Image (tube, rainbow, N blue to C red):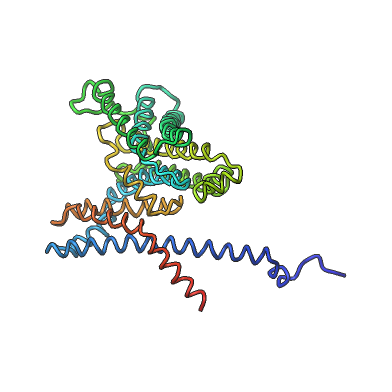
Amino acid sequence: MTSILEPDAERQGRPETQGRREFLATRRRTALVELTMTVLTVAVAVLIAFLVVLATGKDATGALNALLTGPLERTPRIGRWLADATTLALLGLSVAIPFRARQISLGAEGQVYAGALASALVAIHLHLPPVAAVLVPLAVAALAGGALGAVPGVMKARLGANEIVATLMLNAVVVRVFDYLLTDHIKAPDSSAVQSAPVRPDSALPLLSDFFGVPLDQANIGLFGMLAVAAAVWFLLARTPLGYRIRITGSNPDFARYGGLDVPRTIEWSFVIGGALAGLAGAHLALGVYGGLQPDMAGGLAFEGIVVALLGRNNPVGVVAAALLYSYLRVGGDVMEQQTDVGSEAVTIIQAVIVLLVTARALPELVKRYLARREAR
């Protein structure tokens, strides 16, 4: 009688089993290369910054120590690190999705302000039930950011406009409109500073300090929301038809067209989803970090979100890791400036070197060749 169970040796010899094994090995090798590249990039950038500080004759060792250990010395600094990483990760994800469709979107800045403005207006003026008081402003922020992202998406996909120019010009318009509305119409009447009234307590993102009983500055439950969003983005890109279309469009647009995919619609969706995520980043600033609207509340975070996306290789998991690493250096740079005679320019050097190394594609190839030689032995 023949057993219904196939011998392991026979099953393992099947072509499909061998192919799957090779596929998984390739994925592991790629993930290892990406992780190695991220760590090497940051390490080389920190080393170059150290050498630059050393060349100026200042206390390079003390500066490096403050940069690397300062953020962990006090819990408020940890909280600031986590709050910063939350915003940066959302911005990195917002940029990574158009990047995966081979679209260079620089519109995160305007989308952040649109999301912050929309969420704050709802959170300040609408009376909502407790849970809805948080969820509705977040949804409105995502809609505002997504609607703004649709503009350059449609212009690129339907009219052939350059997406870089379109997003940059749109940023300029949105930021000016935001400043005008905040200064002339939304500013709190009893405040001497240019800022809006605070959002209602029910709409503010709960602080992590209230849960853990230690001062964690402005770190809030947006951190867990960001992790959920990153998981959703990973699922979108890896497990859904839209994610497949985005990946194929980014890999080879001509092949995608030949295969019958609607490339213009895919490009539009990549901008819309990216804009929605940037809008959520704006809501995090308005509802969690500042508790209202302030001028220049996004600072240079939108640009740094691009760096985070590049550092994370446009992979959702990598973007979250890169945001944690990058915001750690940002907080460490402030500590270094406070405790030593070295200014935060060292962190600017690190940022510039990271961008240069990330865009140098020769380094990943060197790592891949090294791993390939090791496997061949």
Asked whether 34 or 7 is in front, the reply is 34
Judge from the rendering whether residue 236 lies leftward or rightward of residue 365; answer left or right.
Answer: right
Q: Is residue 69 above or below residue 112?
A: below
Of the 4 image quadrants, the one containing the N terminus is: bottom right
Q: Is residue 239 above or below residue 266?
A: below
- x and y, in percent, of residue 249 in the image: 52, 46
Judge from the rendering whether residue 345 lies leftward or rightward of residue 161; answer left or right.
Answer: left
User: Would you identify the image quadrant in which residue 218 lies?
Assistant: top left
Asked whether 213 or 191 is in front, the reply is 191
Judge from the rendering whether residue 248 lies leftward or rightward of residue 142; answer left or right.
Answer: right
User: Would you identify the image quadrant in which residue 283 lies?
Assistant: top left
User: Extreme bottom residue here?
Assistant: 377
Judge from the rendering whether residue 266 lies leftward or rightward of residue 206; answer left or right.
Answer: right
Residue drawn at (38%, 36%), measured in percent from left and top? Answer: 205
- x and y, in percent, of residue 243 in the image: 54, 45
Asked whether 261 or 247 is in front, the reply is 261
Q: Is residue 139 above or below residue 207?
A: above
- x and y, in percent, of residue 94 in the image: 42, 42
Residue drawn at (25%, 28%), measured in percent from left and top? Answer: 195
Residue drawn at (49%, 45%), measured in percent from left and top? Answer: 233
Asked whether 336 or 10 is in front, the reply is 10
